Amino acid sequence: MTASDTDWARFARDLTRESLAVKTATAKRDADGMFKAGADFYQVCTDCHEKYYGPFLKPDGTFVPPN
Ligand code: HEC
């Protein structure tokens, strides 16, 4: 497995792709498209945080990554 195969890299690529979808919908002033693209965009934030943020968040709010 290379670095570009990791979930981290996939989330980063997904975020790029979805942000461009938001940009496209916004440029077209497509309200429904903006709503949908915005939701898909935010889902990537949530998915990545579920794997790489939440598990390392201590009760006092500090973030302690494994290495
Ligand atoms: C590739 C993974 C990944 C993606 C995608 C991602 N995040 Fe995060 N995010 C993290 C990690 C890891 C942290 C904890 C980093 C730290 O505190 O050093 C974090 C922290 C944060 C924080 C807290 C920062 C702080 O200083 O307390 C906010 C707010 C946040 N992310 C918002 C977002 C938003 C909004 C998006 C989508 C637009 C997003 N993130 C997408 C991984 C990601």
Image: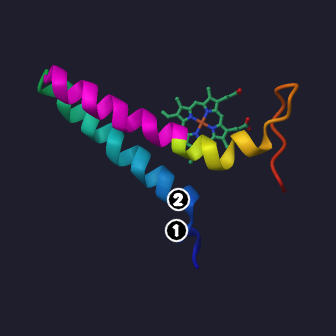
Which quarter of the rendering shows the N terminus? bottom right
- Kind of residue at disc 2: Ala
Q: Is residue 11 left or right of residue 62?
A: left
SS class, disc 2: helix
Scheme of colours in the image: rainbow
Ligand 1 position by quadrant: top right
Dominant secondary-structure state across the stretch colored magenta: helix
Which quarter of the rendering shows the C terminus? bottom right
Q: Residue furthest right?
A: 60
Residue 48 circle label: none
Q: Is residue 63 above or below residue 13?
A: above
- The residue beneath circle 2 is 9
Give the residue drawn at x 80%, y 37%. 63
Q: Which residues are magenta?
A: 30-46
Q: Residues within 10 Å of mark 2 (few under 14, many from 20)?
A: few
Give residue 22's position: percent from left, percent from top. Answer: 28, 32
Give residue 25's quadrant in the image: top left
Give the residue drawn at x 26%, y 39%. 21
Residue 4 circle label: 1
Give residue 6's quadrant in the image: bottom right
Give the residue drawn at x 38%, y 36%. 41
Q: Are marks 2 and 1 in contact (CB under 8 Å)?
A: yes
Q: Residues within 10 Å of mark 1 (few under 14, many from 20)?
A: few
Q: Is residue 66 left or right of residue 48?
A: right
- Residue 38 lies in the magenta stretch: yes
Q: Is residue 3 above or below residue 26?
A: below
Give the residue drawn at x 57%, y 46%. 48
